[in-house]
Amino acid sequence: MTIIKSLAVAVAVEVDMKLISSELSEFRTMFVLELTRLMGNDIKRSIKRIFEKLFSDDLLCSYSYHGIRNKKSFSSLNICNVIFEAIRNDKKFCNVQEKEIEDVIQKYLAQRPFVLKRNKKNQIEVENQNAGGSYQLENITF
């Protein structure tokens, strides 16, 4: 069983976030290796894959990178440092500047409320289509 799976894949509540942050020091090296396996072709894709594997959009809506606008600070969490370390461990990204990684994470976090809203809207539309898609065969004559 991979470490990521043992973390229940998607962190959904604040308690889980704090628990993971405190336990990271115990298995940091193995966790970094697991995250390194999720790397994509570029920084943006790598961050997206890591965040989708670890966190729910609901949880990320309450975070910003620096904790502005009444949100919690993601950069102060241990898991943020682990993500940076995992990215740096990949040969493709060893020379990427820290600012570039920060910018991608900031944008990803800033988009979460909009993505969540869009997903809920799409879900409602699908439910409405399914509800209105039933056909009545009683009025058909043969």
Image: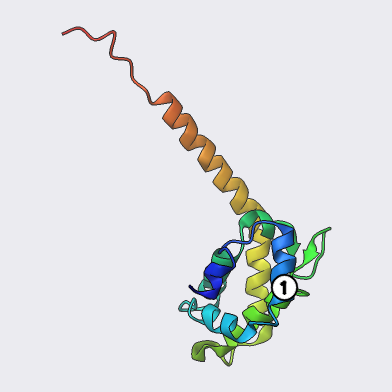
Query: How far across and how far down the image is residue 31, in percent?
Result: 58, 80
Q: Confirm whether residue 48 shows in the render.
A: no
Image: 120 above or below 54 = above
The residue at the point 54 percent across, 87 percent down is 93
Number of disc labels: 1
Question: For this rendering, which residue is in front, 142 or 27?
Answer: 27
The residue wearing badge 1 is 21
Q: Where is residue 74, by image quadrant?
A: bottom right
State the residue lying farthest toward the left: 142
Colouring method of the image: rainbow
The residue at the point 68 percent across, 82 percent down is 26
The residue at the point 59 percent across, 88 percent down is 88
Query: How far across and how far down the image is residue 33, in percent?
Result: 54, 84
Q: In which quadrant will I find the C terminus?
A: top left
Q: Amino acid at mark 1?
A: Ser
Query: How far across and how far down the image is residue 91, in percent?
Result: 50, 91
The residue at the point 50 percent across, 74 percent down is 2
Question: For this rendering, which residue is in front, 41 or 49?
Answer: 49
Image: 9 above or below 2 = above
Q: Confirm whether residue 40 shows in the render.
A: yes
Give neighbour class at mark 1: few <14, some 14-19, many 20+ (Cα, 10 Å). Answer: some
Left/right placement of residue 58 relative to residue 65 reads left
- Label 1: element kind: helix
Q: Where is residue 11, by image quadrant?
A: bottom right
Left/right placement of residue 110 relative to residue 121 reads right
Question: For this rendering, which residue is in front, 57 or 35?
Answer: 35
